[in-house]
Image (cartoon, rainbow, N blue to C red):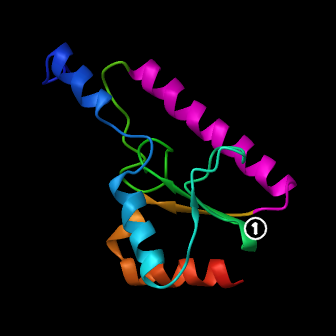
């Protein structure tokens, strides 16, 4: 199946996808800030540059896009038809990098929570999960 966008349109689309300050990340940051948690953003000193770092608690939170990190939800199971090998390599590379990052953080004594883009549909449940993680 051919792409419905021209090569230039697809390139512009892909260039607009952000690596940080994404809508899911900003939503979680606002939620946590509203209930009184303070954090550091994208700390370069830690493996993987976690999205949210709580140094006093030795906890970090990653906000993952379901497609990009191959979540088990329906959005993460999407398999692109065009340029399939590139996308397979890209996404499996992300998952492998995530595994290595989690291992390195655990070895350094950090607790890690991964939140998924699809979990934003139920903010009350996500809020409870974040509070339990940060207070444990």
Would you identify the image quadrant in which residue 19 lies? top left
Using the rendered image of the protein, determine whether residue 126 is visible from the camera's viewpoint: no
Relative side of 72 to 23, left or right: right
> How many marks on residues?
1
Q: Quadrant of the C terminus?
A: bottom right
Q: Which residues are magenta?
A: 84-110
Would you identify the image quadrant in which residue 110 lies? bottom right
Query: Is 10 situated above or below 55?
Result: above
Label 1: few (<14), some or many (≥20) within 10 Å? some
Query: Is 35 situated above or below 27?
Result: below
The single residue placed furthest to the top in the displayed view is: 7
Residue under the image location 44 percent in, 67 percent down: 29
Residue under the image location 57 percent in, 50 percent down: 42
Q: Secondary structure at mark 1?
A: loop
- The x, y position of residue 80, in whole percent, is 34, 31
Would you identify the image quadrant in which residue 41 lies? bottom right
Nearer to the camera, 40 or 113: 40
For label 1, the residue is 58
Nearer to the camera, 44 or 114: 44
Query: Is 104 situated above or below 4?
Result: below
Residue under the image location 16 percent in, 22 percent down: 9
Overall secondary structure of the magenta section: helix
Relative side of 15 to 71, left or right: left
Residue 96 counted in the magenta span: yes
Q: Quadrant of the N terminus?
A: top left
């Amino acid at each position: 199946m051919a792409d419905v966008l021209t090569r230039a349109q697809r390139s512009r689309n892909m260039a607009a996808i952000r690596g940080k300050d994404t809508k899911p990340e900003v939503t979680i940051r606002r939620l946590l800030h509203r209930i009184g948690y303070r954090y550091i953003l994208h700390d370069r000193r830690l493996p993987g540059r976690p999205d949210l770092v709580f140094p006093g608690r030795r906890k970090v939170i990653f906000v993952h896009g379901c497609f990009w990190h191959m979540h088990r939800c329906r959005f993460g199971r999407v398999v692109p038809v065009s340029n399939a090998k590139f996308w397979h390599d890209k996404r499996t590379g992300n998952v492998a990098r995530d595994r290595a990052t989690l291992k390195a953080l655990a070895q350094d004594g950090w607790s890690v929570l991964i939140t998924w883009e699809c979990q934003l549909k139920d903010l009350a449940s996500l809020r409870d999960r974040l509070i339990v993680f940060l207070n444990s």
